[in-house]
Image (cartoon, grey):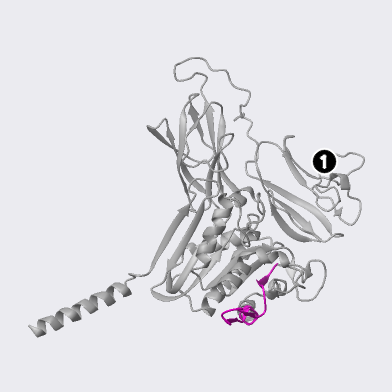
Amino acid sequence: MRLREKNCKAMALALICLLTAAGLRAETVHKTYFENTDYELHVYEILGYEPGPTMMIIGGIQGDEPGGYLAADTYADLSLKKGSLIVVPRANFYAILMNQRGPNGDMNRKFAELQAADYEARIVEILKELINRSDVLLNLHDGSGFYRPEYVDDMHSPMRFGQSIIADADVYVGPTSGKRIELGTIANRICERVNRDIPEPEYKFHFNNHNTLSDTSPHKEQRRSATYYSLTQHEIPSFGVESSKEIPSNELKIRHKSMVINAFMEEFGIVPQNPKILVEKPQLNHLILLINGNERVALKDGETLLLNPGDRIIIEHVDMNYTRGLTADILGQGGINDMGKPYTITYPTRVVIRKDSYKCATVNIALSQTDMAGKAVQRPSRVIDLVEQRPSLVFITVLVDGVRHEIPNGQSLEVKKGAVLEIAEAVIDKPGPGDGLQVNFKGFVGDTRNNTGEDRGYKIPTGSGLLARFSTDGRGVEYPIVASYNGAE
C-alpha cells in the first residue's frame, strides 16, 4: 500500500512538470476596449514559459509616428521563453486614423492630472493600470531630426529627438524608497549594442537625458508624459525610443526599433522564443457585408455592390494579410470606423478600408433606380459619382539637396531653410487614361511666363523666392504640396 502511494505521488509530480514544459503558463491574453469605435484599444499580455520581469511597450500614443505603432505591432505575435510583455501597439487609434499627433491634444501629456471623462482619459487610466504591473517601460516614437549632445546644425542638435533613447534623468533615486535607477548607464549600454549593427553613422543611437526633474530642464513638458509618470510614481526604468522622421523608410524605422527593443529585453532578462518581423504591403483579400440581416456578400478591392435604396448593411469582417489596425469607413456615414454598425444606404457611396492611416482598398456601393417597393427613386444631390472615381495619392518623392525622400499622403517633411528641393514624382493608386496628374508646390512659380501649376522637375530654393502668403502658417515656414487629378485635388 505504501509503495502504491509513493508511485501515485511520483506520477503527479511528473504530470505537473510536463504541463509546465508544454506551456501551461505560456500564453497570450488579448483584451479589447471600446470595440468597433474610433478609439478601439488592443492590449496583448504575453506570458513566457518561465517567470521573469515584465516589459511594457507602448506604440501610437501619437498618431503621426508610424515607426512607433508599426514596430510595437510586431511584438504582439511574439512568444517568450522567459519573462512577460505587455504590448499596446496603438494607444491612440483615433489619432492614427487621422494621421495626427492628437486631434484632442497630445495623449502623452495627459498622465499628470485627471482628465475629462472621455475616451482618451479612460485610455490613459488603462495605460496607468498596465504600467503599475510592469518592471520597465518603453514608449516608442518618431522624432524630428537627429539628436546630438552638442549643436552641429539645426537638424543635428540637443533639441532634436530622432535616433535617441530618452530618459528623464541620468540617475533617479526614489525619494521615499531610496531605490536607485541607473537610467543613463542602461541607455548607453543599449546604444552601444545596437550601434554595432547600424552601419550608417547618421542613424546611430545616442542617450538623450531630458533631465526632466531639474528646474533648468528645457523639456519640462515631459513631466506630463508616460515615462515620467512611470519613473516617478512606480519607480521603474522608463525610456522613450525615438526613430528619426527623416528616415524615409518605415521598414528601416521598424528594424531600428526592433533592435533597441530586443537589446532592452536582453538587458532585463526577457528571452524571446520565436521573434518575427512582418513588413508587407497591406492587401485586402475580401470584405464581408451583411445585407438586410439575411444575405452576405464577399467583395474584393475595386468591386461594386448594387443595392436598393433603403437597404441596411453591416460590415461584418475585413479579411487582409494583417489582423490589427484595420478599419472600414462608409463614406458619408458614421465616423471613421464603421465596422459592425448598421447603416441604411440611401445614396451611392464607397467603403474605404484602411490599415492604420494608409488607405489600402475601396469597395463601391451603387444604387438601383427603384426602391424595394419598385417605385422610381430620384438620385439625390449627395451622389458620389462612381464612374468618375478619383485616384488617391500614395506618396510624393522629393529630392532635398539631391537626397531622396518619400512623403506619404498627409504627412510632412522637415527640411533646413536654404535647401534646394525638387519634386521628382508622385504615385497614385488608380492611374486613369492619359496624364491628368498635376503636382503643385504652393508658394512657388516654376515658369513665370506660363504658370500651369505643375512644379515637378523644378529646382525649388527654400532660402528665398517662396511666397509666404501661400504657406499654411502665413509665416513662410510650412508650405503644402497639392496633387490634383483632372483638376480635382
Question: Can residue 255 be seen?
Answer: no
Q: Position of residue 48 (x, y in %)?
A: 41, 71
> For mark 1, what is the residue?
453
**Quarter the N terminus occupies:** bottom left
Q: Position of residue 290 (x, y in %)?
A: 42, 35
Name the residue rendered at 15%, 83% in the picture: 6
- The magenta segment is 162-187
Residue 229 shows in this picture: yes
Quarter occupied by the C terminus: top right
| Residue neighbourhood size for the residue with mark 1, other residues' Cα within 10 Å, grouped as few (<14), some (14–19), many (≥20) | some
Residue 436 drawn above or below residue 376: below
Vertical side of 6 occupied by 374: above or below:
above
**Left or right placement of residue 70 versus residue 101 in this view:** left
Q: Secondary structure at mark 1?
A: loop
Residue 330 vs residue 298: left or right?
right
| Circle count | 1
